Amino acid sequence: MSNLTLYIGNYNYSSWSLRAWQILRKTELPFESVMIDLDIPGYKQKLLQVSDAGTVPVLNVNGDVIPDSLAIAEFCAKAVPNLWPKDPKDFAEAKRIVRKMHEGFDAIRREAPMNLRRRTEGPMPDDCLKEAEEISAMWDELLGRHNGPFLFDDWTIADAFYTPVATRFASYGLPRSVRSDTYISELMADYHFLEWEALAFTETHILPETDAVNA
């Protein structure tokens, strides 16, 4: 059996780490998590010791390094095929929206960084609100085509990629439809997400600039 070590950032803030960790937990493969505190003196050097990318998450598989959340997801999908939808059209659609999340939505990333301990409802920039509306509309359309409670009926990698975004809606009070709000509740009630969230609530490390957003 492969020896798996997943290097992650802080539970409260590292959205990409949450995605990879949750997907790995769904595979039920045994792995070790190593957390690296972000934005402290020397943290970049620690990241570069793990991989040349200098970012998290990173999955080490018997010495081979996978330094990207989407690549980690694909590794997991090879081990557990049902992590993607079985229907070919749904599979292609899931791949498309995961890629969209992986490469886009810059405003919501910038203006509403993941902060699981945060709850605020102050005004947000227009570009962030526009992306929130786009995401909510996309969720509504997919949920309307399937029986739910997830985007493609059963939980898939697509839901993992949108879980950190769902937490932003909750953290910053971003507007969403009733259907999207129900979906957010489903994502945040997931057993493995609750496990991660509990770790976030107990860690003491803070990122002052992130905590200052919409203070």
Image: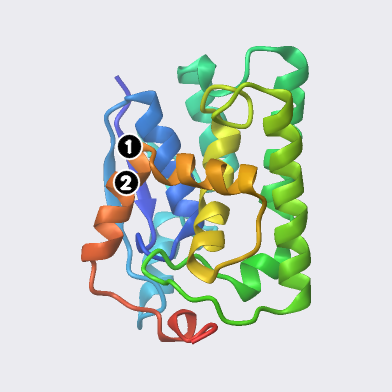
Let me know if residue 100 appears in the view: yes
What residue is at 32 percent from the left and 25 percent from the top?
29
- Residue 204, percent across and down? 23, 73
* Label disc, if present, on residue 191 of the rendered structure: 1
Q: How is the image coloured?
A: rainbow
- Residue 19, percent across and down? 48, 45
Q: In which quarter of the image is the N terminus?
A: top left
Amino acid carrying mark 2 in the image:
Leu
Crowding around mark 1 (Cα neighbors within 10 Å: few <14, some 14 to 19, many 20+) is: few
**Which residue is at the front of the view, 98 or 163?**
163
Q: Disc 1 on helix, strand or loop?
A: helix
- Please name the residue that numbered disc 2 is placed on: 194
- Residue 71, percent across and down? 58, 38
Q: Is residue 64 left or right of residue 83?
A: left
Instruction: Classify residue 99 by image quadrant.
Output: top right
Q: Distance between the residues labelled 1 and 2?
A: 5 Å
**Which residue is at the front of the view, 7 or 112?**
112
Crowding around mark 2 (Cα neighbors within 10 Å: few <14, some 14 to 19, many 20+) is: few
**Which residue is at the front of the view, 61 or 22?**
22
Amino acid carrying mark 1 in the image:
Tyr
Say how many tags the image has: 2
What residue is at 63 percent from the left and 31 percent from the top?
151
What residue is at 63 percent from the left and 13 percent from the top?
86
Q: In this view, does 202 lie to the left or right of 146?
A: left
Q: Do the residues labelled 1 and 2 touch (CB within 8 Å)?
A: yes
**Considering only vertical position in the picture, is 212 above or below 150?**
below
Q: Disc 2 on helix, strand or loop?
A: helix
What residue is at 54 percent from the left and 29 percent from the top?
149
**Considering only vertical position in the picture, is 156 above or below 201?**
above
